[in-house]
Image (cartoon, grey):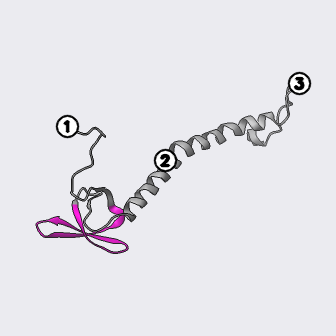
């Protein structure tokens, strides 16, 4: 005779005064709670990062200094819908896919200040 898995067996009689559906609710509470935690800790922040990245890429204009995922820094020379041509200096020009741009710096090429304190 084959053993019957536990979830196919009839549930043990509920204790006196306990709700019969209480065990089912308690067994579903943990997985639902884990899904909620994963959503707020992993899925939602990733969607927000993707949204900011898309907005940054859409705002790129000619003359901006950009950094690619590979670490190449250059000034935007020409743009199409899917590609950006950057001038890396000394006459070097590279065609890259827009999605590979990870950072856009100020037009003058200097990084934005790390804090809001102005030097006197």
C-alpha separation, residue under disc 1 versus residue under disc 2 = 38 Å
Residue at the front extreme?
A: 120
Helix, strand or loop at mark 1: loop
Give the class, few, some or many, for how many residues have Cα within 10 Å of label 2's Cα (few <14, many ≥20).
few
Q: Are marks 1 and 2 in contact (CB under 8 Å)?
A: no
Q: Position of residue 46 (x, y in %)?
A: 47, 50
Helix, strand or loop at mark 2: helix
Q: Which mark is residue 16?
A: 3
Q: Which mark is residue 120?
A: 1
Task: Classify residue 8 as left or right of residue 66.
Answer: right
Q: Which mark is residue 82?
A: none
Helix, strand or loop at mark 3: loop
Of the two numbered discs 1 and 2 on the same chain, state the one appearing first in sequence.
Answer: 2
Quarter of the figure that contains the C terminus: top left
Which stretch did the figure color magenta? 74-100
Between 64 and 103, the residue placed more toward the observer is 64
Q: Which of marks 1 and 2 is in front?
A: 1
Between 90 and 117, the residue placed more toward the observer is 117
Residue at horizontal 55 percent and vertical 43 percent from the top: 40
Residue at horizontal 69 percent and vertical 37 percent from the top: 29
C-alpha separation, residue under disc 3 versus residue under disc 1 = 77 Å
Residue at the left extreme?
A: 90
Q: Position of residue 13 (x, y in %)?
A: 86, 31
Kindly identify which residue carries mark 2.
45
Of the two numbered discs 3 and 1 on the same chain, state the one appearing first in sequence.
Answer: 3
Residue at horizontal 34 percent and vertical 66 percent from the top: 98
């Amino acid at each position: 005779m084959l053993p019957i898995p536990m979830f196919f067996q009839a549930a043990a009689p509920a204790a006196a005064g306990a709700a019969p559906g209480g065990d089912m609710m308690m067994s579903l509470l943990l997985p639902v709670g884990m899904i909620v935690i994963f959503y707020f800790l992993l899925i939602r922040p990733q969607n927000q990062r993707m949204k900011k990245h898309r907005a940054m890429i859409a705002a790129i204009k000619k003359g901006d200094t950009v950094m690619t995922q590979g670490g190449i820094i250059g000034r935007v020379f020409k743009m199409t819908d899917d590609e950006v041509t950057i001038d890396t200096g000394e006459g070097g020009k590279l065609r890259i896919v827009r999605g590979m741009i990870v950072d856009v710096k100020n037009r003058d090429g200097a990084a934005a200040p790390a804090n809001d304190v102005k030097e006197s």
